[in-house]
Amino acid sequence: MRVFITGASGWIGSAVVPELTGAGHQVTGLARSDAPAAALTAAGAQVHRGTLDDLDGLRNAAAASDGVIHLAFKHDIAFSGGFQDAADADRRAIEAFGQALAGSDRPFVIASGTLGLAPGRVATERDGNGPDPAATPLIGGAATRRGSAQMTLCLAVLAPEHKPHVLLPEPHRALL
Ligand SMILES: NC(=O)c1ccc[n+]([C@@H]2O[C@H](COP(=O)([O-])OP(=O)(O)OC[C@H]3O[C@@H](n4cnc5c(N)ncnc54)[C@H](OP(=O)(O)O)[C@@H]3O)[C@@H](O)[C@H]2O)c1
């Protein structure tokens, strides 16, 4: 399977890439500088040079793949006062991937977070969505970030042949 992955050099991506290549998949990773590009090559993956803001590049890379794993996030600006900008860029990237994968059965996976969810109960895609007594309202950055996860979940509703997944790293858990 040809897999396009963003955030390949990150904490999660650096574990996912060798897992995929080791299982015989053809991996292409997004890299915005030389060091992550070299790491991808060393792991047996191809390199797609670009950034999260190169939406045409993301669309093209997704169109050439059999599935996309989106793990890049602008943590550098997110945690220096620009969380909204980082979340907006994330949502635009997800929208671009959705456009490229529309009408296909190619899987699309993103990672999100569970910060802001109530501990001690199973979270669902309804959390943060209005006056549902079973759902937990999200707060702060988690609420901003929810837009990305919601857009991914909407792809499944609008195009059921899609197989989008939202992975929640703490603890690891899938909503779909
Ligand atoms: N790790 C966790 O416990 C955790 C918890 C909650 C949510 N998440 C979410 O899971 C996803 C992956 O997390 P992570 O811990 O693996 O993140 P990470 O280690 O911070 O890695 C971030 C990745 O994004 C890339 N990136 C950042 N800005 C970019 C840009 N403008 N263009 C292209 N690539 C860019 C980085 O590339 P460079 O190498 O070039 O910097 C890096 O590969 C993120 O969405 C994160 O918010 C993770």
Image (tube, helix red, strand yellow):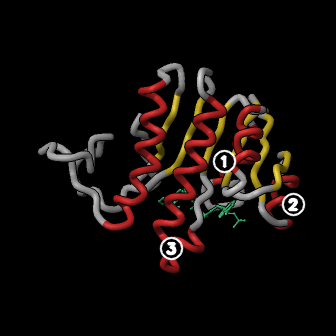
Q: Is residue 129 above or below residue 80?
A: above
Q: Quadrant of residue 132?
A: top left
Residue that label 1 marks:
16
- Residue sitting nearer the eye, 85 or 42: 85
Residue 85: horizontal and vertical position, in percent? 52, 66
Residue at the limit of the structure toward the left, as seen here? 133
Helix, strand or loop under label 3: helix
Left or right placement of residue 58 versus residue 74 in this view: right
Q: CA distance from mark 1 to mark 2?
A: 16 Å
**Is residue 170 shown above or below 105?**
below
Q: Secondary structure at mark 1?
A: helix
Q: CA distance from mark 1 to mark 3?
A: 27 Å
Which amino acid, mark 2? Answer: Ala
Q: Residue furthest bottom?
A: 80
**What amino acid is labelled 1 in the image?**
Val
Q: Are marks 1 and 3 in contact (CB under 8 Å)?
A: no
Q: Nearer the viewer, mark 3 or mark 2?
A: 3
Within-10-Å neighbours for mark 3: few <14, some 14–19, many 20+ = some
Q: Earlier in the sequence, mark 3 or mark 2?
A: 2
Q: Which residue is mark 2?
A: 38
Q: Which residue is mark 3?
A: 82
Q: Residue at x 39, y 39 (%)?
A: 175
Which mark is nearer the camera, 1 or 3? Answer: 3
